Amino acid sequence: MTSLARWCLRRRFVVIVLWLVALAGTTAAATLTGSAYSNDYTVPGTEASRATALLEKAFPGQGGDSATLVWHTDQGTVRAADVEQRMTDTLREVVELPGVASVSGPYGSDGASRISADGHTAYASLSFEPTSGELAKGDVQRVIDTARSAATGNLDVAVGGSAAGAAEGKSGHLSEIIGVVIAAVVLFLVFGSLAASLLPIATALVGVGTAAMGTVLLGHLMSVADFAPMLGTLIGLGVGIDYALFIVTRHRRGLRAGLPVHVAAERAVATTGRAVVFAGGTVCVALLGMLILRLSFLNGVAVAASLTVVLTVAASVTLLPALLGVIGPRALSRRERRRLAEHGPRPEIPTGLAARWSAFVERHPKLLGTLAAAVMLVLALPTLSLHLGTSDQGNNPATSSTRQAYDMLGEGFGPGINGPLTLVADLGGAADRLAFDKLPDTLRQTEGVASVSSSTLSGSGDTGVITVVPTASPQSTDTSDLVERLRADVLPKATATSGMDVHVGGVTASYDDFAQVILGKLPLFVGAVVGLGCVLLLLAFRSIGIPLKAAAMNIAAVASSFGVVTAMFQWGWGSELLGLGAAGPIEPFLPVVMVSVLFGLSMDYQVFLVSRMYEEWLATRDNTRAVRVGLAETSRVINSAAVIMIAVFLAFVLSGDRVIAMFGIGLASAVALDAFVLRTLLVPALMHMLGGANWWLPKWLDRRLPRISIEPSEHSTAVPASPVDLIPLPTAAESAKVPSKAL
C-alpha cells in the first residue's frame, strides 16, 4: 500500500487524468448503447414461471406497454349522455396521440364488462406501439394530460397501468444532490477546511459515477434490475465518502504531527487505507453472497453493487492520495496550519464528549448494555410480522394518477381487478379441451373468486387460458391463500379425470413463488455471509469472542432495521405522511439485498472500532484501557461517518421509488443503530464486562491461523526516504498515557 500511495503521489496528475478518462469513457459508452434493464422476477422451475412460459409461447408478440384510463361519477352513471359523449371524444383524441396503438372503450357492443355493476365506474384499455427501447415518457404524459383534462366536478378521470407508472417516476438526481450537500456540510464541520471536506466528495463522485455507467453497460451482459444503478449509487456514495473520510482524517493527524504532506499521505493509505480495503472487501463478500441463491434477478444486483464498492475503494486508495498531494497542507484549516507553524507538533489529548462518553461506558457497562439491548429488541419486534409480497400502484402516493386509477377500479369492480390470476394449461387433445372448457364453472364456486372469464384457446388449440379475478387485492394474504387453494385442492380435483396440468400465474402467484424460493434459501445465505465475516475477523483480530460478538451485533442491526421498515411500509406508520404511499407488503428481494449490504456496512464499523482496541491491547494487555482508548479515539470519526451515511441514505427517500425508499430508510436506520447504539454503547459495554476473554484464542488454533494485519501501526509502515521520518510518533502505549484526540 505504501508503494501504491507513493506512486499515486508522484504521478498525481496522471492518476487524476486516468480517473477522469475512465469516467468519461464509460459515460460515453453507456450513452451510446443505452440501458437494457430487466425486472423479471420469475424463477425457473416454479409454477408461475411455467404458466408465463406457456402463455408467451401460445400468444407471442402481443405488443408494447399498456395503460388503463378510468373514470368515475358520484352522481348519475357513466352511461349518462353527457358523460358518454365527453369520454368518447376524449378516447378519440387519445387514440390519435403519438405512440398510442389502440383504445378499447366501454361504449361499444363488446364493452359492457368495462362498466361496473353500479354504473358509476368505467375504464378503457390502451395499448402503445411496440418499441425497441423504452417508451417515451413524453408520449405517455400526453395521454395522462389529455385524459385528465376531461375531468369535471362530477367526473374523476385517472390513468393507471405500467406505462403510466413509468411516466410518473421522478427523474433527475435530486436525492443524490441533497445527500452530497449534507455530506459536504458535515465534512466541513469535522475538518474545518474546505479543501479537505471536498476531497471525500470528489473521490466518491468519480468512483460512483464510473460504476453507475459501468452498471448500464453490465445490463447488456446479464440481467440487471432497473433499481440496481440507484441502489449502487446509494451504497457507493455512503461507503465512498466514509472511506475517504477515514483516510483524510489519518492524513490530517500525520500533518498535525509534523510530517510532510507526502509522508502523511503515504502513511494514511498504508494504515487506514488497508482497513478501507479490508472493509470494502467484506462489503463485496456480503453482496456477492447473493450469488449463492442462484437467482438471475439478484445476480445482476450483486455484481453491480459490488462493482460500485470496488471502484469507490479503488478511488479512495489511488485518486484520494493524488488529490491530497495537490492540495498539500491545505488539508488542515488555516487555524491548524498557523498553530503548527507557531508551536510545532504537540501531543493531542482527547477531550470533549468522546473521552467523557468512553469513561462513562467504562463505569456503567451493565446498565448501558442492558438499555442498548432493550432498544434493539423493541425495534426488532415488528420483524416478526414481516409479510413478503408485491407492492403495486395501490401503494403509490394518494395524489398520483396511478393510485387514483387503482382505487377507482377497486371500488367499482372489486379489489381483485387490479391483479387477476392467469390459469394456463397445456392441452393434449379434445378431452383436455372439453375439461378445460368446463373449468370456469368450477372456479366460480370457489371461495375467494369474484369472477371468471370463459376459456380462451390459442390458434393451434394446444394451450388454454382462463382469467380469474379474486375478491381480494393482489397483495392481500387472502389472494395468496386463494393461489394455494387452487394449486393444492381445486385444480387437482377438477382435472383428475383428464390428467392435464393447469398452472396458476399472475402477479400475486409470481411474487409468492419468488418469496418462497428466497425464504427457503435465506438460512443458507445468511449462514454463509455470517460465516465468512467471522472467518475474516478471526484472522484479523485472532480472537473467538470478537467475531461472535460482531455476528450477534450484525444480526441485531439487521433485525432492528427490518423492524423499522416493517412498521413504516407494511404497517403504514408515517408512509403516507412522508409521501411514500400506502401500507403494503415488503418486496421479496429486499431481505436478501439488505442483509448483504447491512452485514458489509456493519463490519466496516466493527473493523475501525476494534482495530484500534486491538492495537492498544497488543501494546498494554490491559482490556479496560484498550476498550476505553479505542472508543475515545474512534467514536467521533465513526459517528461523523455515520451521520454522512445516514444523510445520504435518507436523501434517497426523495427518489420517488418505493423500493429505493425502503432501502434508504432501512439502511439509514441500520447505520444509526449500529453507530450510536451498538458500536459506541453495546459493543464496548460487553467488552468491558468480558475483560480479557475478548481476546482469547486457543493456542493450537493461533499456531495454525495465517497472520494478517488490517491496520498496522504507523511505525511498521514508515517510509525511510526522508529524514523527517525520524520524527518520533506516539506509540499505542504512549497514546494510552496521553491519548490522541478523538478523530
Image (cartoon, rainbow, N blue to C red):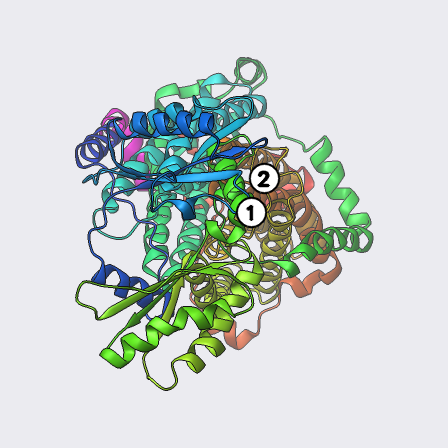
Residue that lies at the very extreme toward the bottom in this rendered image: 497
- Quick check: 142 above or below 486? above
Residue 707 on the magenta segment: no
Res 248 seen here: no
In front of the other: 299 or 108:
108
Q: Using a 10 Å C-alpha cutoff, classify the residue at mark 1 as few (fewer than 14 neighbours), some (14 to 19) or many (20 or more).
A: many
Residue 443's label in the rendered image is: none
Q: Using a 10 Å C-alpha cutoff, classify the residue at mark 2 as few (fewer than 14 neighbours), some (14 to 19) or many (20 or more).
A: many
Instruction: Give how far across and how far down residue 141 sits, in percent.
Output: 36, 27
Residue 7 on the magenta segment: yes
In front of the other: 527 or 162:
162
In front of the other: 715 or 209:
209
Residue displayed at 66% across by 38% down: 574
The residue under label 1 is which amino acid type?
Tyr
Is 31 on the left-hand or right-hand side of 224? left
Res 325 seen here: yes
Question: For mark 1, what is the residue?
Answer: 605
Q: Secondary structure at mark 2?
A: helix
Question: For mark 2, what is the residue?
Answer: 638
Residue displayed at 21% across by 50% down: 221
Q: Quadrant of residue 329?
A: top left
Instruction: Give how far across and how far down residue 378 sits, in percent.
Output: 73, 53
- Magenta stretch: give its range: 1-18
Instruction: Find out whether the residues at labels 1 and 2 contact each other: C-beta distance under 8 Å.
Output: yes
Is 720 on the left-hand or right-hand side of 13? right
> How far apart are the two marked residues, 1 and 2, measured between alpha carbons?
7 Å
- Quick check: 17 above or below 391? above
In front of the other: 296 or 351:
296
